[in-house]
């Protein structure tokens, strides 16, 4: 007989969120139909209860001004969040560098609205978002991939933009916060890399995406936040600690993001914006090399990191059993120390950042436990 390790996941979730609440960090659980089964509107209740128990004394901060709330207030009021992952960010594309031509070349195998379900997630509905709200989440991060929805002049397809807007409206109508970004345009298959060749070839495209995104949502209030490029890695597709050169280009991309949004004026002049370091890392090396972008607005920037530690517990189950370190069990003494060290390092850079912090992605994938083996049968 087998069962899922949801009780172990709950221990991890509680440890992680206790550290977030203690350090005034908003966390967003990365979900690919594993914590919340979207097609059936079901969940692992023990994990949800463990998360929400950390915020039972959490108090919202009122906005007593005529302007947008500060980044600090937004992070406090977002409380705890969930990712609509592998949905609007899904796609079938790849970008590789041709050394002979000194050019990044793209292959796009799917376009249009069908990308929303091409990674086997169900179509997002109002009922689904309402269910997320009822579970206790107060914010939703909506990763969005734009490549595959652009014409040769970098204009975003109107059908795609309307679908993005529809889902954003689902979230805001539930009185939740919403964060939208540029997602798999970066990362391992994306064209946005932390190097000069990528920036020179694609900066106008990226600026066009930001500009259209900002103009489309120009009249939206403070509960809509914009985020920059997700997990930018270098031209070698390295997920290791960044080189100084890679960090330099991440900083350049982040500055492009802030400048492009602010240039559209109106409410976007004070909208809270979220920026991320190389590959979403918060290691000592990554944090030392990272620089917050300059901003014409004061106190409206947020720093984002991602974390899946300890990976032996958090990463998905390996079907062939080749990962010998993999475990479905949470070792509270050892694993809590690992997470505490991550947060201690991160918070040592709080003064340098001079900005509130969110964890845009964290999660533990469910693993099956063989109960007969565990019992020694």
Image (tube, rainbow, N blue to C red):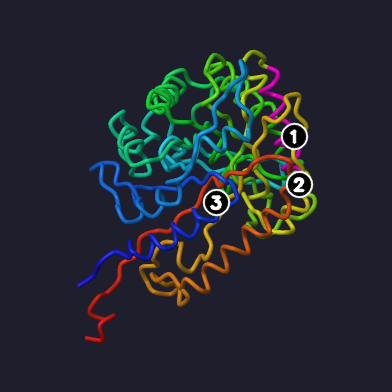
Quadrant containing the C terminus in the rendered view: bottom left
Mark 2 or 3, nearer chain start: 3
Residue that label 3 marks: 20
Side of 99 relative to 363 (left or right): right
Please report the residue visible at 55 percent of the width from the left and 51 percent of the height from the top: 20
Whether residue 308 sits left or right of residue 104 in the image: it is left
Indicate whether 48 appears above or below 163: below
Disc 3 crowd rating (10 Å Cα; few below 14, some 14-19, many 20+) is many
Q: Residue at x 62, y 44 (%)?
A: 357
Could you give the CA–CA distance between mark 1 and mark 3, rounded to whole angstroms? 38 Å
Mark 1 and mark 2: span between their CA atoms? 32 Å
- Residue underneath mark 2: 351
**Chief secondary structure of the magenta span?**
helix
Say which of 330 and 191 sits in front.
330
Under tag 3, what secondary structure?
helix
Which residue is drawn at the image coordinates 52% and 35% (left, top)? 77
Q: Which residues are magenta?
A: 249-263
Residue furthest toward the left? 1
Residue 320 vertical position relative to residue 303 in the rendered view, above or below: below
Q: Is residue 150 left or right of residue 288?
A: left
Residue to which mark 1 is pinned? 200
Q: Position of residue 208 (x, y in %)?
A: 63, 23
Magenta stretch: includes residue 3: no
- Circles 2 and 3, Cβ within 8 Å, touching? The answer is no
User: Is 261 within the magenta?
Assistant: yes
Q: Local crowd at mark 1 within 10 Å, few (<14), some, or many (≥20)?
A: few
Q: Which is nearer the eye, 321 or 150?
A: 321
């Amino acid at each position: 007989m087998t069962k899922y390790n949801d009780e172990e996941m709950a221990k991890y979730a509680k440890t992680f969120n206790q550290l977030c609440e203690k350090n005034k960090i908003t966390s967003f659980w990365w979900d690919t139909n594993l914590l919340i089964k979207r097609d059936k509107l079901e969940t692992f209740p023990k994990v949800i209860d463990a998360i929400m128990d950390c915020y039972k004394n959490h108090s919202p901060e009122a906005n007593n001004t005529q302007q947008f709330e500060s980044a600090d207030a937004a992070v406090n009021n977002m409380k705890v969040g969930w990712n609509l992952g592998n949905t609007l960010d899904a796609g079938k594309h790849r970008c590789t560098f041709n050394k002979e031509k000194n050019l990044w070349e793209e292959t796009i195998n799917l376009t249009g609205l069908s990308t929303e379900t091409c990674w086997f997630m169900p179509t997002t509905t109002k009922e689904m978002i309402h269910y997320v709200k009822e579970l206790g989440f107060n914010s939703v991060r909506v990763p969005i991939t734009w490549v595959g929805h652009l014409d040769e002049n970098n204009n975003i397809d109107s059908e795609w933009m309307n679908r993005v807007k529809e889902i954003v409206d689902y979230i805001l109508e539930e009185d939740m916060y919403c964060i939208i970004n540029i997602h798999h345009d970066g990362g391992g298959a994306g064209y946005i890399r932390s190097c000069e060749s990528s920036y020179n070839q694609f900066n106008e495209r990226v600026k066009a995406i930001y500009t259209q995104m900002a103009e489309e949502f120009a009249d939206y209030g403070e509960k809509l936040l914009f985020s920059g490029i997700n997990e930018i890695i270098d031209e070698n597709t390295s997920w290791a600690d960044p080189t100084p050169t890679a960090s330099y280009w991440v900083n350049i991309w982040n500055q492009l993001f802030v400048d492009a949004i602010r240039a559209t004026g109106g409410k976007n002049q004070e909208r809270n914006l979220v920026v991320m370091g190389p590959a979403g890392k918060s290691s000592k090396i990554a944090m030392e090399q990272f620089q917050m972008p300059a901003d014409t607005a004061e106190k409206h920037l947020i720093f984002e990191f991602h974390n899946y530690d300890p990976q032996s517990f958090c990463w998905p189950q390996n079907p062939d059993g080749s990962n010998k370190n993999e475990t479905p069990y949470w070792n509270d003494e050892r694993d809590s120390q690992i997470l505490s060290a991550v947060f201690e390092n991160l918070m040592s850079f709080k003064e340098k950042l001079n900005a509130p912090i969110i964890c845009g992605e964290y999660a533990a994938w469910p693993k099956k436990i063989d109960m007969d083996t565990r019992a020694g049968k």
